[in-house]
Image (cartoon, helix red, strand yellow):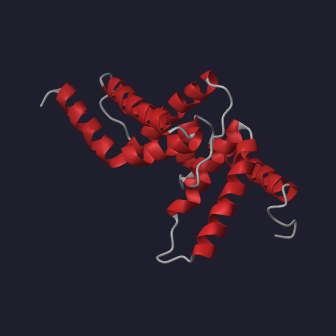
Amino acid sequence: MSKERFHRDLIVQWYDQYSAPVFKYILKMIKDVQRAEDLTQDTFIKAYKYMSGETTVKYPKTFLYRIAHNLTIDYLRKQAPINIMEDFLSRKKDPGPSIEKIVEIREGARELYEALSLLKTSYRQVIILRKIEDFSVQETAHILNWSESKVKSTLFRALRNLEKLLIKGGFINETS
């Protein structure tokens, strides 16, 4: 098997395995379905081009998320500020939630995302990767091209600022 065919097959395999979570990550950052689809495709194209000069990637998931992250940040830099958040709580469904519970979850998610949208980009990124996407500190550091200590300290500050915004907005009590 030629090197090019091997890389093409590998990218197809990665696409099958990771395109949906990469798309969701990008969508959470930009909240534009069509553009998120485009950036997801661009992520895999860029990965393929990278693979033509490189034979192995040790951690494909973090490799792809890093590409997606960089493409998304480039896109955001070119755009006017927009609301970045999506209702991530909707993916955490109970088997049979009541209408009241659904309304409560959606209202809480809306309030959370309002507060998240007020955070600076680096805070929003680290919260999404660590707390929503459940990446490890090491994976988050790789994706963001930060040190692990920067991930930890930024997450700490981001969560503290998010809590202050939620308290200020009356969404949670100071004693919560």
44 w.r.t. 139: above or below: above
- Residue at 38 percent across and 42 percent down: it is 60
Quarter of the image with the N terminus is top left
- Residue at 36 percent across and 25 percent down: it is 50
Quarter of the image with the C terminus is bottom right
Q: Position of residue 160 (x, y in %)?
A: 79, 53
70 w.r.t. 163: above or below: above
- Residue at 62 percent across and 46 percent down: it is 85
142 w.r.t. 114: above or below: above
Q: Say left or right for 22 vs 136.
A: left
Is residue 131 something one can see in this rendering?
yes
Q: Say left or right for 60 vs 5.
A: right
- Residue at 23 percent across and 31 percent down: it is 8
137 w.r.t. 146: above or below: below
Q: Say left or right for 157 vs 10.
A: right
Q: Position of residue 14 (x, y in %)?
A: 31, 42
Is residue 59 something one can see in this rendering?
no
